[in-house]
Image (tube, helix red, strand yellow):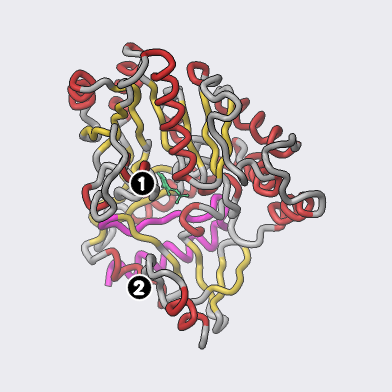
Amino acid sequence: MNVMEMDNTYVAHSYGRFPICITNGKGSLLYDENGKEYIDFGTGIAVNSFGVSDDVWKEAVIEQINKVQHTSNLYYTEPCAKLAEMLCKRTGMKKVFFSNSGAEANECAIKAARRYAFLKYGDGHSTIITLKNSFHGRTITTLSATGQEHYHEEFTPFTEGFVYAEANDIEDVKKLAAENKCIAVMIEIVQGEGGVCPLDKEFVQAVRKFTEENDMLLIVDEVQTGNGRSGQLYAYMNYDVQPDIVSTAKGLAGGLPLGATMLGEKVKDVYTPGSHGSTFGGNPVCSAAAISVLKRIDDKLLEDVRKKSEYIFSELEGTEGVEQVTGMGLMIGVKCTKPAGDVVKACMDRGLLLLTAKDKVRLLPALNIDFEVLKKGVAILKETIAE
Ligand SMILES: *Cc1c(COP(=O)(O)O)cnc(C)c1O
């Protein structure tokens, strides 16, 4: 059996894979088993922040592997402590809980909000408002939090305690808060899986004001938007708000599994020994990788991300076959007259890897993608869309 046959036989069929087998790469270029080269505008879904097989990232990972790869959370390790300090200093948050994925980072955020409200107000104060068209993960609880009907089928019973507001409608948020004992509002600044749709700044600021006035927590899911992707370190920084809880994962460790839930002043002490945990969470290798990634996301890199973003917008907006370009930083959605799936397939044949999000083509290139490689990829995309 070749790799594809073996995979199709033995790996659970939860993914619709494209018929290419990636073997290696460098930076923003990937190669398949036949040696065909691809420009990578997907980065493993916003995970490989600095592309593939990056030298700086590899050095950080290998250095830590040579010391100790895992200890459990029974002992202290330097990478975990240092990473938490870095995250707090750069966000104004107070404490961090580490896990292994976006869904787990959100679980931790949800548990933190519930425990905060329980300790303060007692039983029954547990409802969290999330937004329609959101995506928060694949566990039973984060699927519950996800405001899209089609995720709510066939896996019942779901975790209770979520109600869904219309995005960009503060009156709907207020109405739901009046009808339920609400403790928090959970949002993505840019709804990624929902079609790369940025929320209105006025809406996010109104949610912040409303939650503050009503002792409700603002939870921002930065699993996809975080770690430089939006052109700021975290996307909420584009909107001049300070959340109570921020979850992130995907690009944080640049290709290793790491989730982080940052806890602000109000909830910083909500977890006490034994109240939450993770075997792998804060693993020293993943933490060392994340330290290396965060160090490189400085003002200069963020400015570069914004410049590359402007370039992509200016190339695609108003060109033939493009109906709309949405997003922020290097997280961009392109609504084409042609079906998104057809564009992605045609581009793949031409050596460009893209993603989709709902009815849009989605671009998530590496933060440090070479301008020349970016230009080449955008040209292939433009040409394909216009045909
Ligand atoms: C990808 C994603 C998740 C889930 O992350 P996993 O690591 O797959 O569990 C949650 N929220 C958002 C906004 C995401 O984009």
Above or below — where is 263 with respect to 387? above
Above or below — where is 50 with respect to 96? below
Q: Nearer the viewer, residue 214 or 195?
A: 214
Mark seen at residue 267: none
Which residues lie in the magenta part?
358-387
- Locate residue 257, reporting x and y percent: 57, 51
Amino acid tagged 1: Ile
Local secondary structure at mark 1: helix
- Locate residue 155, reporting x and y percent: 29, 53
Q: Is residue 94 visible?
A: yes
Examine the structure image and report whether residue 226 is included in the region drawn in magenta.
no
Local secondary structure at mark 2: helix
Mark seen at residue 140: 1
- Locate residue 312, reporting x and y percent: 41, 53
The residue depicted at 40 percent of the width and 26 percent of the height is: 114
Q: Residues within 10 Å of mark 1 (few under 14, many from 20)?
A: some
For label 2, the residue is 345
Number of dots carrying numbers: 2
Gap between marks 2 and 1 measured at Cα: 32 Å
Examine the structure image and report whether residue 380 is included in the region drawn in magenta.
yes
